[in-house]
Image: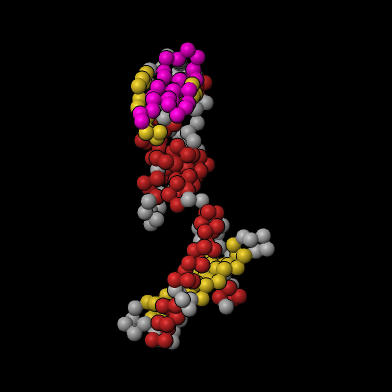
């Protein structure tokens, strides 16, 4: 219903909300628009009983003028655009598509927040991912014995550095050419940082990853 209200440029208020019923009315004075639904056996399932889509309030009323699309609502609409991590879909693209498809104008900041919400829906909040790192690295170390796994935290238990070299890579190095290729890439999450990687080439000329680490910046100390 939030999605519907944004696309139709009006606002509603909740008249009744309970485990058994959910009723909405337009915020316009004496407007006939209303929506009523009731629960059907399953607590998460509701059936629409009544829906009057006609508004008797003025289209130029403040009800419409003040209506602003929320990042949460529009973000849920553009989620399919971000399912493939390789897809480049910028806030400017969001502005263009929402305007052409739904005739709704978004500011650049609204479009940027929309993108952030869509990514959060798909992948969760970056802070949650960092909170899972200790348990993930612990399982990794127990699963791949003889691996080298290091996690360094700050004094207030925030993430600082991480280093991983799996046992399979360590054992495979014995059969590889004595050449190591190093590279780095920027992390584009909210917390930035740099991922450094090292790899080599095995006897079949295939690339074998040796280790990777996440640091705050690329410098000689980080590579060491």
Check if residue 190 falls in the magenta segment: no
Q: Residue 131 placed where, x, y %?
A: 55, 57
Q: Is residue 159 above or below residue 164?
A: above
> Residue placed at 42% from the left, 26% from the top?
20
* Whether residue 92 is visible: no
Left or right, 46 with reference to 157: left
* Whether residue 42 is visible: yes
Determine which quarter of the picture holds residue 154.
bottom right
Q: Is residue 222 above or below residue 123?
A: below
Check if residue 23 falls in the magenta segment: yes
| Closer-to-camera residue (80/128) | 128
Q: Residue 146 placed where, x, y %?
A: 48, 78
Q: Is residue 70 above or below residue 11?
A: below
Q: Residue 77 placed where, x, y %?
A: 40, 40
Q: Residue 161 placed where, x, y %?
A: 58, 67
What quarter of the picture does the N terminus occupy?
top left
Q: Residue furthest right?
A: 155
Q: Is residue 212 above or below residue 133?
A: below
> Residue placed at 35% from the left, 22% from the top?
49
Left or right, 14 with reference to 203: right
> Residue placed at 49% from the left, 71% from the top?
141
* Residue range of the region highlighted in magenta in the rendering: 16-41
Left or right, 136 with reference to 221: left
Q: Residue furthest left?
A: 204
């Amino acid at each position: 219903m939030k999605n519907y209200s944004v696309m139709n440029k009006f606002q509603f208020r909740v008249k009744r909300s309970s485990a058994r019923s959910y009723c909405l009315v337009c915020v316009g004075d004496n407007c006939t628009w209303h929506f009523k639904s009731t629960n059907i056996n399953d607590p998460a399932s509701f059936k629409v009983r009544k829906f009057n889509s006609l508004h008797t309030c003025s289209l130029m009323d403040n009800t419409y003028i003040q209506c602003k699309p929320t990042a949460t609502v529009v973000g849920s609409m553009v989620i399919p655009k971000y399912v493939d991590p390789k897809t480049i879909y910028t806030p400017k693209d969001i502005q263009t598509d929402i305007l052409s498809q739904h005739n709704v104008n978004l500011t650049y900041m609204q479009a940027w927040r929309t993108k952030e919400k869509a990514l959060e829906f798909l992948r969760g909040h970056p802070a949650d991912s960092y909170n899972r790192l200790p348990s993930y690295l612990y399982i990794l170390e127990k699963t791949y014995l003889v691996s080298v796994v290091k996690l360094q935290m700050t004094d207030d238990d925030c993430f600082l550095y991480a280093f991983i070299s799996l046992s399979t890579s360590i054992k495979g190095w014995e059969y590889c050419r004595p050449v190591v290729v190093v590279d780095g890439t920027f992390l584009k999450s909210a917390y930035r940082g740099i991922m450094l990687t090292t790899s080599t080439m095995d006897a079949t000329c295939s690339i074998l990853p040796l280790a990777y680490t996440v640091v705050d910046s690329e410098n000689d100390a980080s590579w060491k």
